[in-house]
Image (cartoon, rainbow, N blue to C red):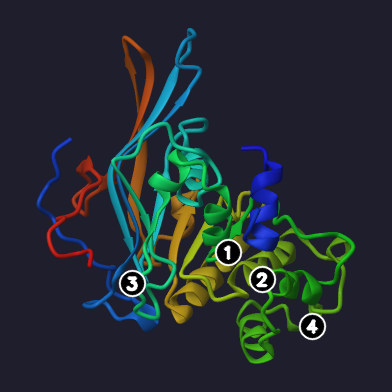
Amino acid sequence: MQDSPERTALTAAGAASSPAAGLRGPPEGSAGRAGRAAAPPVLSLRGLRKDRAPDREGAYSLLVPSFILRLGEKALITGPSGCGKSTFLDLAGMVLRPDAADEFLFFPGAREGRDDACDAAGAWKANRFEELARRRRSVGYVLQTGGLLPFLTVRENIRIRLRLLGLPPDSEQEARTAERLKITHLLHAYPARLSVGERQRAAIARALAADPPLVLADEPTASLDPENAHTVMRMFAACAEESGAALLVVSHAPEQMPDMHFRRLRIRIGATEAGTQAVLEEVLPDGAVSAVTERRKGILR
């Protein structure tokens, strides 16, 4: 998917069906600071729909029956090209307006235990764009191309998100993240002097700079060879796990992360009388699939 101005701005500033009974927590090894048993939800979606060209031939609808992502959880979404993976990320990141949503809750204060849920569905319906822009500041976003500003050094690219949010630089976290991503020696370099893999690692550091509870990544290793892609994804997953953030990744190459304990999802495409319909499904451990659901009772305060 081509990076839109809205998505690029989000990476830099962070502004501008019946449920099944299976209860999921973060997979073993993915809970980070949040802790597996008590991890609260960061994102809760139900009855989410986005339509494209509904009145013309070739109409398309993306449906999300139910989806809950918790602190410390890592989720991977796969599917054929054009199925709506990037569209789903843009919906989850509150960049793209849904056409319908029975529930769309985002919990920016989940890590601190704050009860400050954002009703994104209501905000979109009432055109409360300033509220949505404010909530996006709690979302980190890594684009396919990295989206680094070419006239800033790596360090300045990392810090610009904090500056635009009115936050002071966190030198300790910056140093720790740079070391884990192996870009400490590149902090004074400009993006043009970096390899593709180095630029992606710098973009990951920027997305994590403000310690967001939710990090989205759209094909973050698409431009890398398999060996480097696996290395970068392992670094990315480890950084997210250490911070306790929820990580939602779109990828066309799930084989690059077989041992990283990602919750697996896919978008299935089918033909209907009204056009093409894409549905988010969960890939179960035995290889079966189901609509993405979670027991509703008791998970939201």
Q: Secondary structure at mark 2?
A: loop
Specify which label sits upstream in the sequence, 4 or 1. Answer: 1
Inter-mark Cα distance, 4 to 3: 40 Å
Q: Position of residue 39 (x, y in %)?
A: 28, 74
The residue type indicated by label 4 comes to His
Inter-mark Cα distance, 2 to 4: 26 Å
Tell me the quarter of the picture where residue 140 sits. bottom right
Q: Position of residue 99 (x, y in %)?
A: 42, 31
Specify which label sits upstream in the sequence, 2 or 4. Answer: 2
Specify which label sits upstream in the sequence, 4 or 3. Answer: 3
Inter-mark Cα distance, 3 to 2: 21 Å
Q: Are marks 3 and 2 in contact (CB under 8 Å)?
A: no
The residue type indicated by label 1 comes to Arg
Label 1: which residue? 137
Label 3: which residue? 115
Inter-mark Cα distance, 4 to 1: 28 Å
